[in-house]
Image: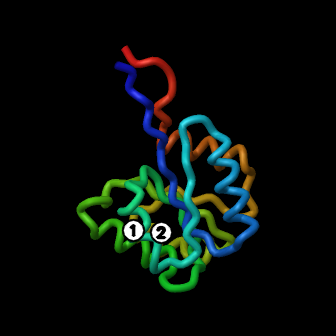
Amino acid sequence: MTEELRKRVVVIGEDDEPIAVLLRDSINDEQGYQAVVVSDGALVLETVRQVHADLLILDIMMPGLNGLEVYDRVRADPDVENMPVLFVSAVSAAYDDEFKKRGIKDVIDKPFDLNDLLERVRVMCPADVGDRA
């Protein structure tokens, strides 16, 4: 019996459509990953739970709830509290204190290098690729 490898599910909380599409398509092109975009902060946590996300990529400025509010709710939810979260933001410098207060170190500034971002995804959430013993 062959065990099919489960793809790592990445939820992208991003309301800027060109960036959201770029991230989703680039992550989906990576072997072992499946990305889902959610453009409203209020729906991110619900989506993370529904799809059993392995990684959350968050923008700070989103409608509904901002990225930090979403992060706080994720960390308060026992089902997903340990899921890695990567922030991608054009205004990250303005939120340095908020990041420090929460112990957030995984932040990439916009504009970003796509290869750097994909490498960060692979490090934070390694895919299940290759043969199993």
In the displayed structure, 28 sits above or below 79; it is above
Q: CA distance from mark 2 to mark 1?
A: 5 Å
In the displayed structure, 102 sits above or below 31; it is below
The picture places residue 18, in percent across and down from the top left corner, at: 76, 67
Left or right: residue 90 versus residue 131 is right
Element marked by disc 1 = helix
Q: Residue furthest bottom?
A: 64
The picture places residue 124, in percent across and down from the top left corner, at: 48, 44
Using the image as rendered, state which of residue 88 and residue 24 is in the foreground. Answer: 24
In the displayed structure, 131 sits above or below 123; it is above
Element marked by disc 2 = helix
Q: Residue at x 60, y 35 (%)?
A: 31
Give the total number of marks visible in the rendering.
2
Indicate the quadrant where residue 36 lies. Answer: bottom right
Do labels 2 and 1 touch, CB within 8 Å? yes
Which of the image's four quarters has the C terminus?
Answer: top left
Q: Residue furthest front?
A: 1
> What's the residue type where badge 2 is placed?
Phe
Q: Residue at x 60, y 77 (%)?
A: 94
Label 1 Cα neighbours within 10 Å, binned few <14 / some 14-19 / many ≥20? few
> What's the residue type where badge 1 is placed?
Arg
Which of the image's four quarters has the N terminus?
Answer: top left
The picture places residue 16, in percent across and down from the top left corner, at: 69, 73
> Which residue does the numbered mark 1 point to in the structure image?
102
Disc assigned to residue 92: none
> Which residue does the numbered mark 2 point to in the structure image?
99
Q: Residue furthest left?
A: 78
In this figure, which colouring scheme has been used for the structure?
A: rainbow
Q: Residue at x 46, y 53 (%)?
A: 55
